[in-house]
Amino acid sequence: MIVINATKSSIKILAFSLLLSMMPSIGCKKFKAPPPEIPKEEIIKPETGEPKEKLFLPVKFESPALTLEIEYTAHTGFINILKFSNGQQYEITYVDALLKKLRQFNSGKEIYFADYLAASGKITRVSPFEINGQRDDSKGKYLLTYDAGGQLSTSKWYNVANSLVEEKEFYYGPTGLLTTSTAKKINTVNASYTYDTKKGIFSNVKSFQLLSMEVRYAFLNYGACNLTKYTEATDEKATLGYTYIYNTDNYPGEITIKTASATQTFKISYIELK
């Protein structure tokens, strides 16, 4: 048996010496940082749900008596040209997505134009002119107002002497479709409108309500749905009846208009708005 005699002070010195001998190895030891986490590749999931609804623009109306071809600014619902087979043509320009000018031609000769003025993002004034040779004759002005929902509510036509010639008021149903209108001229004319539940021919065309006030043909009607009957309370002869044959996209592929004395049918062609 070997006995080691050590005092308390010698034990302390020995422990301290051992600690010093370990310090260099501790100070020189390098600790590696954990490797950076490699982000997982993001997985893009395909969209689920029903496919987006296709939108269409009418480009041609064909009947034995009359044909209309319509041209648009590419990839928009803004009409640039309305070309009729009877020689009439309308050219429309826009500024900041608002109507600026409509020009009417007859067999290539400009005979009429209308300037549109805007305030707060709405057309509030229309100034029409007839062209007579080198002279532009003012036809007065139309002042337009809108309701809280942004729908046209009144149209007032003043002559060049600034006298009120005609005032129209427009009323809409809960779906936003025009249901009645009142025209106050020499006599007051009350009109009513009824519709189908299909997609309107011009429902994707911009500013068409204002355009149809200048380009007045019975088959050019605006609205989210299609007009089926127009009735004037005091004149049964002014009644117009509309029937449709619908295509596979639920737009009218054919329209028939009946009056008290005539019937007219148009076939309608469309392009997809993309």
Image (cartoon, rainbow, N blue to C red):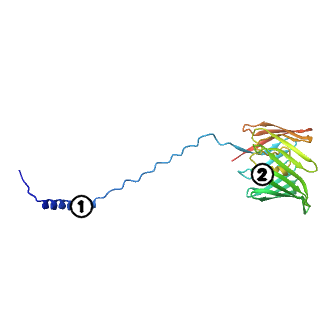
Q: Quadrant of residue 126?
A: bottom right
How many other residues sit within 10 Å of disc 2, few (<14), some (14-19) or many (≥20)? few
Q: Are marks 2 and 1 in contact (CB under 8 Å)?
A: no
The amino acid at mark 1 is: Met
Q: Quadrant of residue 130?
A: bottom right
What kind of element bears circle 2? loop
Taking depth in this image into account, of 236 and 241 the one nearest to the observer is 236
Give me the C-alpha separation between circle 2 and circle 1: 87 Å
Q: Quadrant of residue 254?
A: top right
What kind of element bears circle 1? helix
Q: Is residue 110 visible?
A: no
Residue 48 vertical position relative to residue 164 in the rendered view, above or below: above
Residue 39 x, y percent position in the rendering: 45, 50
Q: Earlier in the sequence, mark 2 or mark 1?
A: 1
Residue 8 x, y percent position in the rendering: 13, 59
Taking depth in this image into account, of 150 and 110 the one nearest to the observer is 150
Q: Is residue 11 visible?
A: yes
Residue at the spot of label 2: 147
Q: Residue furthest left?
A: 1
Residue 96 vertical position relative to residue 47 in the rendered view, above or below: below
Residue at the spot of label 1: 23
Residue 246 x, y percent position in the rendering: 76, 37
Q: Nearer the viewer, mark 2 or mark 1?
A: 2
